[in-house]
Amino acid sequence: MSEKGDLPDRDRRFEAALTAALAEQEKYEKKRYSRMGRGAEKATAPLGGLLRRVVPSGVLRRALALADRGAGLTLPAASHHTDDLAACDATALRVQGWAAGSGAASGGAAGWFGGLGMTLDIPATISLAARTVRATGQAYGFEGEGEEELVFRLMVLELATVRGLEGRKESLGKVNQLAKELQAPEVRYVLEKGADWVVDKVIDRVARGLGTDLLKRKAAQVVPLAGAAIGAGVNASFQTDVARAARYGFRLRWLMHRRLLPAPEAEAGEKA
C-alpha cells in the first residue's frame, strides 16, 4: 500500500485529475456564490422579510429533515469506481447539470402561479437540494446513513446558502473541521452515539439560513407569469450553488481520506 493511502494508479490521468481537483478546491474557497444568486438577492431583498412569515422556519425544518431522508431512497447505485477521481468529478458534474435543469423546470412551472406557486415550489426545491447533496456524496463514495453523515450533509447545504464573506468563511471552517474529524473513528463513534442534539441544532440553524436565502431569491416569483422566467433562473442558480458546495465538501473528504490533502484550519467558533 502506498504511504499516501489506498490510491488508484498514479498515472498521467490521475495526476491531471488531482491537479484540477486541488485547483478547484482552492478556487471554491475564494468564491462567494453564483452571479444570478447575488442579483436575485438584491432585487428581492425587500420582500424577503414578509415572505418569511408566510413560510415559517418550523415548516422548513420539517421539510429539510424529510427531504434528506427521502433523498436517500431515490438514488440509483453508483456505476463508477470511487477510487477514480476523474470519474467521481465527472459524475458529480452530471449531478449538478441534472439538478440545475430540474430546478429550472420546477421553478419555471411554479412561477406561472405567482405566490401560490412559489410556496408550493419551496418544498420541491429543498427536496431537490437534499438529493443533490446526497447524489454528490455518493459520487465520491460517501453514502452513509449515520447521524454524523447527516450533520455533514446539512453543513454542506448551509455552506451553499450563507451570505457575506465572514459568514462564508465560518461555514467553510465548519465543513473543513467536520470533514477532518470524520476521518477519526473515535469522533464518528461519539457522533453516532450521542448526535441527536447536534442534529437538531444544525437542522434548526440550516433551516433558518435556507429559509432566508430561498425566500430572498424566490421573492420575485410572487408576480404571476413574469415569475416563470425568474423562477427558472433562480432555481437553477440555487441548485448550482448547492452542487458546487457539495462537490467541494465531499471531494475534500475524498482527498483527505487518501491523505492527499490536509483539512484547512477551521475558523474560531462553534463546530456545529
Image (cartoon, rainbow, N blue to C red):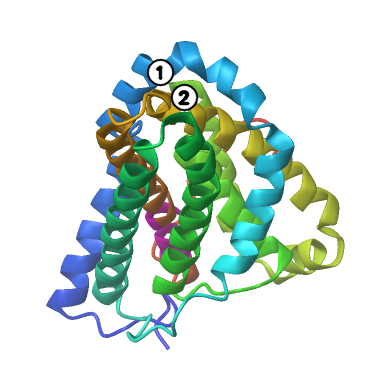
Is 103 included in the stretch rendered in magenta?
A: no
Crowding near pointer 1: few (<14 within 10 Å), some, many (20+)?
A: some
Q: Position of residue 210 (x, y in %)?
A: 56, 37
Kind of element beneath mark 1: helix
Write the start and end of the magenta stretch as one range. Answer: 247-256
Question: Where is the N terminus found, in terms of image quarters?
Answer: bottom left
Q: Position of residue 251 (x, y in %)?
A: 40, 61
| Mark seen at residue 216 | 2
Q: Which residue is mark 1?
A: 44
**Position of 20 relative to 230 (above/below):** below
| Residue 70 visible at all | yes
CB-based contact (under 8 Å), mark 2 and mark 1: yes
Q: Is residue 36 left or right of residue 57?
A: left
Crowding near pointer 2: few (<14 within 10 Å), some, many (20+)?
A: many
**Quadrant of residue 66 within the rendered picture:** bottom right
Question: Where is the C terminus found, in terms of image quarters?
Answer: top right
If you read the primary sequence from the N terminus, does the residue marked by circle 2 or circle 1 appear first?
Answer: 1
Three-letter amino acid code at the position of disc 1: Thr
What residue lies at 65% left-to-right and 50% top-to-bottom?
63
**Quadrant of residue 15 within the rendered picture:** bottom left
| Residue 265 visible at all | no
Q: Nearer the viewer, residue 136 or 63?
A: 63
Residue at the left extreme, as displayed: 12
Mark 2 to mark 1 CA distance (whole Å): 5 Å
Residue at the top extreme, as displayed: 46
What residue lies at 38% left-to-right and 80% top-to-bottom?
82
Q: Nearer the viewer, residue 115 or 185?
A: 115
| Mark seen at residue 97 | none
**Position of 219 relative to 211 (above/below):** above
What residue lies at 32% left-to-right and 84% top-to-bottom?
80
